[in-house]
Amino acid sequence: MLTAEETKAAEEAAAQSIAEKVKADTAALEAAGINTDAGKEAIRKERDARRTAEKSAKDAIDELNALRAQKAEADAAKAAEIEAEAIRKGEFETLATKRADEIKAVTAERDALQAKIDTLIAAVQPGVTDAWKALPDEIKSFYDGADDDVLAKRAFLAKSHPAIDKLAADIKRNRDKLVEAMKENTVAEEEPTPGEEPAQPEA
C-alpha cells in the first residue's frame, strides 16, 4: 500500500517525464522544419491522453488502497472477535472445571458423612432396639417417625426420657397403692367382726 508521499512523488515524476518528452519532441520537430503547431496539437492530445491514463491509474491505486484498508480493518475485527470468543470459551471451561471439582469435593464429603452416619447407626441400634421394646405403649403413641429410622427413635427416646421416668414413677406409685390396698383388704377379711367367734381351723 502506497503512502501519500509516495503517491505524490510518483505523480510529480510522471508529470516531469511528460514535460521533458514534450519539450524534446517540439525541439526535434522545429529542427526538422516541420510545422510545430500541428505537432504541438498532436503532442497536447497525447499528453492529455497520458494524463487521463495516469489519473485513471491513480484512481485505481486509490481504490485498491481503500480496499486494502477495508480488508485490513475487517481482518483486525475478525481477529478481535476470535480472540474474544477464545477468552470467553477459556473462562467457560475454567468455570466448568471449577464446578466439576466442587461437585466432586461435595460428593466426597457426603460419602464420608454417610459412612460416619452408618457407623453411628450400627453402634447405637442394639441399645435403641432394646430401649424401644421396653418403652411403654403410651409413650410410643407419640412417635411419628419412620419405624426403621434408628436415629429418629434414638432422638425420641432422649427427648421422651423425662416423660418415661414420670410414667414409670406413676406406674410404680399406683402399683404400690394397689399392693397396699390388697394387704389392707386381706387383713380386714382375717379380723373377726365384734361379737363373732374367730373362725376355728378345720381339724
Image (cartoon, rainbow, N blue to C red):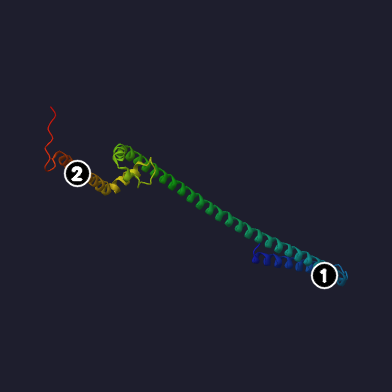
Indicate the secondary structure of the residue bearing disc 2. helix
Where does residue 194 sit, x and y in percent of width and height?
12, 43
Query: What residue is rendered at 48% in x and 51% in y?
Result: 95
Query: Few, some or many C-alpha atoms within 10 Å of disc 2 (few <14, some 14-19, many ≥20)?
Result: few
Residue in front for this viewpoint, 164 or 54: 164
Side (left or right) of 158 relative to 106:
left
Please report contact status of discs 2 and 1: CB closer than 8 Å, yes or no. no
Task: Give how far apart the Cα atoms at labels 2 and 1 are.
Answer: 154 Å
- The answer to which of 1 and 17 lies nearer the viewer is 1
Is any atom of residue 1 visible in this view?
no
Residue at horizontal 65%, vertical 66%? 4
Q: Is residue 154 left or right of residue 186?
A: right
Q: Quadrant of the N terminus?
A: bottom right
Residue located 49% across and 49% down the image: 96
Residue 97 rendering spot, x and y as whole percentages? 47, 47
Reading the image, the residue beneath label 1 is: 44
195 up-or-down from 41: above or below:
above
Q: Name the residue under label 2.
A: 181
